[in-house]
Image: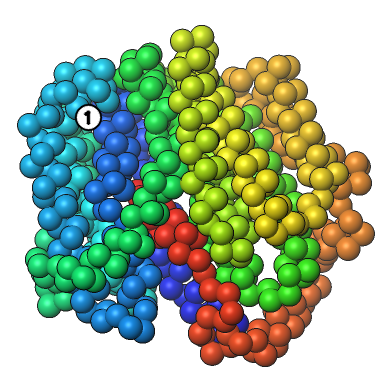
Amino acid sequence: MSGYLRRLATTGAAYTAASIISKLIAVALLPLYTRYLTPADYGAAEVMFSAVVAVSIVIRLGVVEALLRFYYKQDEDPDRVVSTSFATLFWAGLVSVVILMPLAGPISELLLGEDDPTLARISIAGLFVLTLSEYLLTIFRLDERARAFFVVTMLSVLITIPVTVVLVVPLDLGAEGLLLGSYATGLVIVLGLIFYHRHRLALAPDRPLLGRMMNFGLPTMPAELSLYSLSFIDRILIARTLGLAEAGLYSIAVKMSQGIAVLVRGFQLAFPPLAYSIQDDDDARKAYSAVVTWFVTVMAFVVAFLWLIAPWIVALLAAPEFADAADVVGPVSAGAALYALYMVLLVVLGRTGQTKYNLPATGAGLVVNIVLNLLLLPVMGIIGAGVSLVASYLVVVILMYVFTQRLFPVPYEWLRLAKVLVASSVLVAIGEVFVPDDGLAWLAVRLLLVAALPVVLLVTGFFSAEERRWLLLLAQPSVLKEKILEARRIGKAAGEESPEADGRPGRRGLPEAIEVEQWDEDLRR
């Protein structure tokens, strides 16, 4: 087990670091972009970016998902798997562009609520770029070439930033500048990667192999599409119902919740391999229960922080005309936390091998999201979209809980979960109702409310005796360090005795549903 975890840590950290850095850079550029883009410009660009990702999931036909599976199958030629995958995605992307390009006008009307064929044409071309870039970067991951993946990804980011800034600021191209900056530089990277991997690629697929890959990959596409649609369909509905300016404000709120995304990526990296390494089912149930309790606690703390200080974050990172985005940062952050909880339950579901239940859960959540947005947007504005997001992810989590409890019952610590949820909700409510949202003095008051959460949990008996002892060690860094080192030594000794000590997966590997979701998240910037 320790060998597998060391390999996971060294390669996975590079993949996740690239994703995190690109997200942080995107947030850091908001002060610049929001002063040269109107909310409507920003909303139009974000709607088109999200639509491109969604359509890319469809035209991929599950090929990338199949690539992850078939590349390692002993009865398949990995070189043929790689070349067949490229040929399929190349022609699928090219044909899609040819079909969609004449429909640019109607597509822009459908997505944006206004006729902007130029923006749609740029996005359609970007569809081809995004599809191939995801595939070409995945080749590095198949070979576990973490350094190459990181270098190429960061090179792409470093090229994209100055080009986009020039297009948006001095050339004043607005939303077109954002899209052109991303996809034009992306095309350069794609062409470079095609040349680099040229000896492994082909334009003619192995048809029998493609048939086998499609049989595996196609069924994964609906669940992936429904899950991603949960996070972007609201922006299209906002654009059509309230206008592009409101979609821009909502998109800024989504960007402000990136703190949750960073934590989720780290957790997704660490938890699944550890979860599946626990061979005994009873031990696994206890571990999953404890993980859920502490994961919810950390998420509640972060959501409370983002919710209460959102006005100051938006004022710091965005132009004044985007100030209303602060109203929905809290609900969007809560929705992101629920998505993270869904990923925890997906790991539990993956242990059973019954990942077919994923689609009913995400599909139901998508339906709820659409219906609630149609009902709430005219009444509550973008806050209604935030409420709809929370409700839809809550439906997904509840259904996943029902499915997993039938297949692999876990004794969750409901009393402790109730304490942390009630405490964090009450503190947020106090801050929202009684504390003004401007001025440094009131910011300090809201920060004190956030800091009060651990104290409230301590007073209400949330922490066990052992947890309280660990908390006391925070005041004794040297003792705490020794305890951590001791725990590592014990974990390492136990891991070296496991079937996975040599780095090979044991009885329970990482299910494709989990691995695909992790890898896709890293590639979507």
**Measuring 39% from the left and 31% from the top, which residue is drawn there?**
233
Q: Quadrant of residue 335?
A: top right
Mark 1 residue element: helix
Q: Is residue 379 above or below residue 128?
A: above
Note whether residue 199 is visible. yes
* Camera-nearest residue between 230 and 363: 363
Q: Residues within 10 Å of mark 1 (few under 14, many from 20)?
A: many
In the rendered image, the quadrant that contains the N terminus is bottom right
* Camera-nearest residue between 125 and 469: 125
**Measuring 52% from the left and 35% from the top, which residue is drawn there?**
365
Spot occupied by residue 259 in the image (x, y as percentages of width and height): 53, 45
Q: Is residue 426 above or below residue 162?
A: above
* Camera-nearest residue between 9 and 172: 9
* Camera-nearest residue between 105 and 162: 105
Residue 385 shown left or right of residue 468 in the figure = left
Residue 499 shown left or right of residue 478 in the figure = left
Spot occupied by residue 39 in the image (x, y as percentages of width and height): 33, 21
Spot occupied by residue 447 in the image (x, y as percentages of width and height): 69, 34
Q: Is residue 249 above or below residue 48?
A: above
Residue 469 shown left or right of residue 299 in the figure = right
As shown in the figure, which amino acid type bears the numbered disc 1?
Answer: Ala
Spot occupied by residue 193 in the image (x, y as percentages of width and height): 17, 66
Q: Which residue is mark 1?
A: 175
Q: Is residue 327 above or below residue 394?
A: above
**Measuring 75% from the left and 23% from the top, which residue is drawn there?**
430
Note whether residue 167 is visible. no
Q: Quadrant of residue 142?
A: bottom left
Residue 410 shown left or right of residue 23 in the figure = right
